[in-house]
């Protein structure tokens, strides 16, 4: 058969949402490349996705349903092959038994961004569980604090138009390792830099991005709001606050101005562990440079004061009036610009969905070990690998191992979470199903159509949930909606139709023009169109309503520091995406074994050298790693890359064995970067990595 080419969307949890071009031969994808015509991603794929077909065509794909016949936590040896009818009957009976015995709220669907697609990720599964009256999942594990902060400040997740950053004269990449986590924004930053813009990386670590910037400022983790307040104070002292714009388009400026009296540059510098002249020079640049663009990353919202940090950073260009100008203002996420209402599709008007309790996904370890009442006795996991990704891993595994917990996992390949399942159902990957994608980093919507055969008996998530509904005897017509039906429902109110996207693949759908300044005259999506430096609604949640600073918990605890002197952060690696790709040979080979990066002073104080085997520990647990001694960090601060699979790691734990179940001030997000540890040497053979072979990951046919 002749080769054909097809456009589609990358499904990964990344702000860039690339459009790709697949080459297909005889129903199989044989090549992948970026679409050169896409205005934002411009034909480039990241290193991870250049090897995406390793995942699609890999020999470890799950191709048939599996039922557990042995103990939990062991792996594929505890499972046998089953037919779809057999597996669906087991899932239906397990869910119904929970409903009859414990009530429907004892069922918890657990899902997140294994795909960012609205159809496969966020509609039919949640719709089924809403209809059943299952507990509602609070999807907090990534962007919850930032989303809540942006909603408080701007009314939604909105900001400057990302392509307009080429017009900026000063760019702050704040907590954003752009080259690893927002690659396609970098060419626009680089163009601005070539035009003379000064680019500053604000990050506790000297990342690849920081190395390419004109300046790197490294505050202590969790102190970003203090730095923002100090910079605002310098702007105020310099007479550079745009009072006319503030009066016209914000609420709470007089109160914030009064608060800034308590935040001289000297205080901010001390709180952040920075030289005062560094803060003062940056404040002077901000005071004198228009337009200034602040591109805010999501890693900085992984500590207790995350909501206030996002509010304070994004308030800085409100004070300077930079939203007046193309290329000026702040941007964290673009999702609020889209006309997609997932909740209306999950809970359509013609389908009953009773009010139910909510369970915070970041607190899964606590929810499965006594925090939830009534107890969760059925868990359905899709688009997620919580056994690898949730905080307090030891306790999470204890909960997943409960014999009274009936667990169903929809997966593409065998993961840590599959080890604890009762039923594993094979799911399709992106080239094998229909999906619809907006973006949280640009303004284009993309339709992805199935263009290759699914392996074996694998089915799309949506079809699996339709079949579960049928097996349970549920006959509401909304539970039979096709994927195309769901996509059309999601596009109601959007300025583009399903037919247009089927013809064009992608379209700009937010109504924000390229290169524009969407909030030059205010018009934020708040009731009065003003940004809220003061938000009285926050008082109901016990949060200071005025933009301010909440310090971290463990990082700022001097007593804890005596036992655990190192603050540990866990940023994203370049070659794995959350826990996706963490079992694939090319990606794992590029990442190497788990490492903990130490400043040379900290390594020397412990008698450690590059390559030393160590245990990283605190009162919650520990993980094994090799030491990497480098200057990317500062004394007292260690880092390790997140999302290695425990089952493929030495000691069968990863960094989440030491992270805590603790909520951010806004949104109930996790605090992965607010962790104290000690690092101690162990015998070298304990950290020898012997990656699990593919045949050990795939149950026998």
Image (spheres, helix red, strand yellow):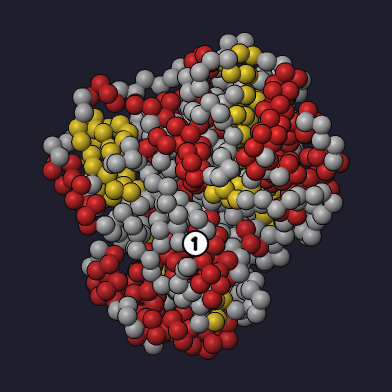
Relative vertical location of residue 609 with respect to residue 71 in this rendering, above or below:
below
Q: Quadrant of residue 229?
A: bottom left
Q: Quadrant of the C terminus?
A: top right
From where the camera sits, is residue 56 visible? Answer: no
Across and down, in percent, residue 533 comes to 50, 77
Res. 565 in view: yes
Question: Does 268 sit above or below residue 671?
Answer: below
Which residue is under mark 1?
666
In the picture provided, is 663 more to the left or to the right than 680? Answer: right
> Which residue is found at the position 26% from the left and 57% from the top?
557
User: Which residue is most to the front?
Assistant: 101
Rendered residue at 77%/34% (across/down):
469
Q: Quadrant of the N terminus?
A: top right
> From the viewer's perspective, is residue 543 above or below residue 632?
below
Residue 268 location (% of width, % of height): 30, 71
Residue 641 lies, in percent from the top left, at: 38, 40
Residue in front for this viewpoint, 121 or 111: 111
| 326 relative to 249, above or below | above
């Amino acid at each position: 058969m002749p080769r054909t080419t097809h456009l589609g969307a990358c499904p990964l949890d990344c702000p860039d949402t690339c459009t790709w071009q697949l080459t297909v031969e005889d129903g199989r994808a044989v090549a992948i490349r970026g679409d050169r015509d896409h205005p934002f991603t411009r034909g480039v794929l990241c290193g991870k996705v250049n090897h995406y077909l390793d995942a699609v065509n890999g020999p470890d794909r799950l191709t048939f349903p599996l039922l557990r016949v042995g103990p939990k936590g062991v792996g594929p040896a505890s499972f046998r092959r089953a037919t779809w009818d057999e597996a669906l009957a087991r899932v239906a009976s397990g869910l119904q038994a929970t409903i009859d015995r414990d009530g429907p709220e004892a069922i918890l669907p657990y899902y997140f961004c294994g795909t960012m697609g609205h159809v496969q990720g966020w509609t039919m599964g949640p719709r089924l569980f809403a209809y059943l009256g299952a507990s509602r999942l609070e999807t907090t594990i990534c962007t919850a604090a930032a989303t809540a902060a942006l909603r408080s400040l701007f009314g939604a997740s909105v900001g400057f138009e990302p392509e307009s950053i080429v017009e900026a004269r000063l760019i702050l990449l704040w907590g954003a390792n752009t080259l690893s986590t927002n690659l396609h924004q970098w060419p626009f930053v680089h163009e601005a830099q070539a035009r003379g813009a000064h680019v500053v990386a604000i990050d506790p670590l000297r990342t690849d991005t920081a190395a390419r910037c004109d300046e790197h400022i490294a505050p202590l983790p969790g102190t970003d709001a203090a730095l923002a307040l100090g910079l605002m104070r310098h702007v105020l002292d310099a007479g550079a606050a745009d009072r006319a714009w503030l009066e016209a388009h914000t609420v709470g400026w007089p109160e914030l101005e009064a608060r800034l009296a308590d935040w001289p540059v000297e205080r901010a510098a001390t709180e952040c562990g920075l030289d005062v002249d560094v803060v003062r020079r940056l404040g002077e640049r901000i005071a004198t440079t228009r337009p200034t663009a602040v591109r805010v990353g999501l890693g900085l919202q992984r500590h207790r004061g995350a909501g206030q940090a996002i509010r304070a950073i994004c308030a800085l260009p409100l004070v300077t009036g930079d939203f007046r100008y193309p290329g000026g203002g702040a941007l964290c996420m673009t999702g609020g610009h889209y006309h997609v209402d997932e909740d209306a599709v999950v809970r359509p008007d013609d389908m009953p969905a009773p009010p139910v309790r909510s369970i915070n996904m970041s607190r899964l370890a606590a929810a499965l070990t006594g925090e939830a009442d009534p107890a969760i006795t059925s868990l359905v996991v899709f688009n997620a690998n919580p056994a690898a990704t949730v905080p307090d891993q030891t306790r999470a595994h204890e909960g997943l191992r409960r014999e009274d917990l009936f667990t169903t996992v929809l997966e593409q390949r065998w993961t840590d979470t599959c080890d604890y399942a009762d039923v594993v159902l094979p799911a399709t990957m992106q080239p094998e199903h229909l999906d619809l994608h907006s973006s949280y980093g640009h303004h284009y919507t993309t339709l992805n159509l199935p263009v290759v055969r699914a392996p074996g008996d694998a089915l799309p998530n949506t079809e699996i949930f339709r079949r579960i509904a049928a097996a349970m005897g549920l006959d509401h017509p909304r539970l039979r909606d096709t994927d195309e039906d769901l996509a059309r429902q999601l596009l109601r109110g959007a300025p583009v139709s399903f037919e247009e996207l089927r013809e064009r693949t992608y379209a700009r759908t937010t109504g924000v023009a390229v290169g524009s300044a969407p909030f030059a005259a205010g018009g934020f999506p708040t009731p009065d169109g003003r940004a809220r430096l003061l938000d009285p609604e926050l008082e109901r949640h016990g949060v200071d309503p005025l933009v301010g600073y909440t310090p971290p918990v463990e990082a700022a605890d001097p007593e804890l520091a005596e036992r655990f002197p190192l603050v540990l952060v866990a940023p994203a690696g370049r070659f794995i995406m959350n826990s996706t790709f963490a079992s694939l040979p090319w990606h794992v080979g590029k990442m190497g074994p788990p490492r903990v990066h130490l400043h040379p002073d900290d390594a020397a104080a412990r008698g450690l050298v590059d390559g030393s085997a160590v245990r990283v520990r605190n009162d919650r647990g520990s993980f094994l790693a090799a030491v990497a001694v480098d200057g990317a960090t500062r004394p007292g601060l260690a880092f390790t890359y997140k999302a290695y699979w425990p089952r493929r790691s030495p000691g069968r734990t990863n960094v989440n064995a030491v992270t805590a179940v603790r909520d951010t001030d806004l949104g109930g997000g996790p605090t992965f970067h607010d962790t104290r540890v000690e690092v101690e040497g162990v015998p070298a053979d304990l950290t020898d990595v012997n990656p699990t072979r593919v045949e050990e990951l795939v149950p026998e046919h």
